[in-house]
Image (tube, grey):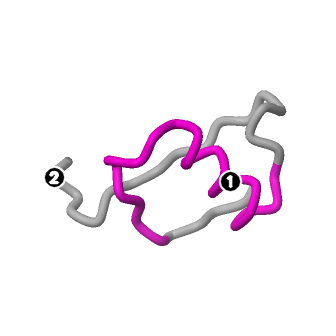
Amino acid sequence: MVLAAQPVDFRKSVHTLSALVSEALRANPYCGDVFVFRSKRMTE
């Protein structure tokens, strides 16, 4: 299990989020794992 605690700007596209998974987590975004993103404000 890998956890990244940095918040994400949800205005980004799904392609940008998958690139974040590839680059920051060094994981394959298409491997079948679930990646959870959180916003800076916990109300969104």
* Circle 1: residue type: Val
| Nearer to the camera, 2 or 30 | 30
In the displayed structure image, the side of residue 9 where residue 23 appears, left or right? right
In the displayed structure image, the side of residue 41 where residue 10 appears, left or right? right
Is 4 contained in the magenta span?
Answer: no
Q: Secondary structure at mark 2?
A: loop
Q: Secondary structure at mark 1?
A: helix
Please tell me whether residue 21 is drawn above or below residue 33 in the rendered image: below
Is 10 contained in the magenta span?
Answer: yes
Residue 2 location (% of width, % of height): 72, 60
* Circle 2: residue type: Thr
In the displayed structure image, the side of residue 30 where residue 12 appears, left or right? left
Residue 1 location (% of width, % of height): 75, 55
Residue 28 location (% of width, % of height): 82, 44
Q: Residue at x 58, y 39 (%)?
A: 15
Q: Which of the marked residues, 2 or 1, is nearer the chain's N terminus?
A: 1
Please tell me whether residue 7 is drawn above or below residue 18 in the rendered image: below
Q: Residue at x 55, y 48 (%)?
A: 16
**Residue extending furthest bottom?**
6
Picture quadrant of residue 29: top right
Which residue has dot 1 on it? 21
Q: Which of label 2 and label 1 is nearer to you?
A: 1
Q: Residue at x 63, y 57 (%)?
A: 20
- Given contact means CB atoms under 8 Å apart, are the residues at marks 2 and 1 in contact? no
What are the residue bounds of the magenta stretch?
6-27
Which residue has dot 2 on it? 43
- Disc 1: CA contacts within 10 A as few (<14), some (14-19) or many (>=20): some
Q: Measure the alpha-carbon separation of dots 2 and 1.
A: 23 Å
